[in-house]
Amino acid sequence: MEMRIALVHDYLCGIGGSERVFQYLCKEFKEADIFTLAYNPSKTLPYFKNIKVNTTWLNKYVQSMEAFRWSFPFATYVMEGIDLSKYDLVLSSSATVAKYVRVPNGTHVCYCYIPTRALWQFEEYFGKSIKAQFLKFIIPLLKKRDYKVSQRINHFIAISNSSRHYIKKYYDRDSTIIFSPIDIEKFRISSVKKEHFLIVSRLEHWKRVDYAIEAFNKIKLPLRIIGTGKDEKRLKAMAEPNIEFLGEVDDNTLIREYGEAKAVIFTPQLEYGLIPLESIACGTPVICLGKGGVEETMVPWESNNSEIPSTAIFFYEQTSESLMNAINMFEKASFNTQALIKHSLKWGVTEFQSKMRLYINNLLADEKTTDNFN
């Protein structure tokens, strides 16, 4: 009998790293049925228009990331209501609600980007907003439920050592690491290098673009910012004329911007971070907070005499002063364009898909052997 497989993602109402990774999973497991809480074809990757995406009844109301955030507690119960009883394997791609699905007759493998950040890193995520004051009273209950759900998942896959650390810390579960990929083939070197710096980010409080704006306000160097988000109005109000906001851009524009930039600035502490990898794939070095996933993917510059080709300048505090010091260091450093590109090749899509397919095949083979033995 043919194996029945379902792929489940949190929601498809935006374009970010997890949506791109889910796209690569869908391309690898073409035999699978696709499920998500909600899907807005005008807001996410064009790829999903070519496949059938099954949604929940909340799809009518959740058509943006902001709508999803407000729906979160209720959405977890809606995800539990998806009927996955006919599937032998369910692979969830989750940072929030996809992991809540029930798999009564099969194996549930969760490709976990990070345990739900809004719950487990509440203060960093919400800051001191009015919403934070409202939600802090129910966070303990939501944490308790999130932990309970994590215990019924059969296997976790982490996207990095940092992600694995958080899965163990918050869920007390072990996990296997399969690093998230970038589409190496679509990136390219620009024939033109300009003098501006670049930020690519969702404009949200926890991404901490604010201290980068403060730094560039002081040093007056040109900075271009790609991305939108609920913090956009505040950030624009902070910025001096040397800082330009480009909004959302298509992939071709993004690749051109990566290639033309002098360096890409990466401000958040993330469990992984695809943007630094995309930058070096275009031959552009990175100036980044040296904590979290970048410690696994980037090689920090120490001196021009280093035997190991560097990919980034690290700084270690989320302050304008720390970033400005890193920019000064960058001006004295040198980077080899071909070495940057060569380093990025370790994180290709094909390798990721092969590792994921092998993991699933080995898992199912082991379970079949165990069933036969029993």
Image (spheres, helix red, strand yellow):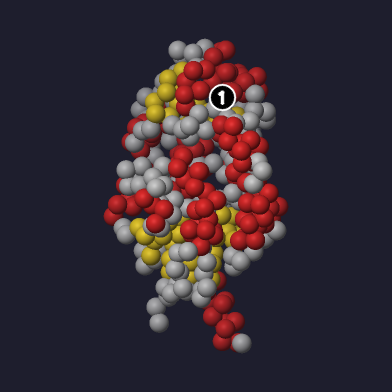
Vertically, is 254 above or below 221? below
In the rendered structure, the answer to whether residue 102 lies left or right of residue 44 reads right
The residue carrying pointer 1 sits among few (fewer than 14), some (14 to 19) or many (20 or more) residues within 10 Å by Cα, namely: many
The residue tagged 1 is: 210
Q: Nearer the viewer, residue 311 or 64?
A: 64
- Name the secondary structure under disc 1: helix
Q: Nearer the viewer, residue 99 or 195?
A: 99
**Disc 1 residue type (three-letter):** Asp
Vertically, is 2 above or below 312? below
**Residue occupying image coordinates x 46% and y 33%:** 229
**Residue occupying image coordinates x 47% and y 64%:** 81
**Whole-percent x and y of residue 268?**
58, 34
Vertically, is 91 above or below 133? below
On-image quarter of the C terminus: bottom right
**Whole-percent x and y of residue 166?**
66, 50
In the rendered structure, the answer to whether residue 18 lies left or right of residue 54 reads right
Whether residue 106 is visible here, answered yes or no, is yes
**Residue occupying image coordinates x 51% and y 76%:** 105
Whether residue 345 is visible here, answered yes or no, is no
**Residue occupying image coordinates x 43% and y 48%:** 19
On-image quarter of the N terminus: bottom left
In the rendered structure, the answer to whether residue 274 lies left or right of residue 28 reads right
Rendering quarter of residue 194? top left
**Whole-percent x and y of residue 350?**
43, 55
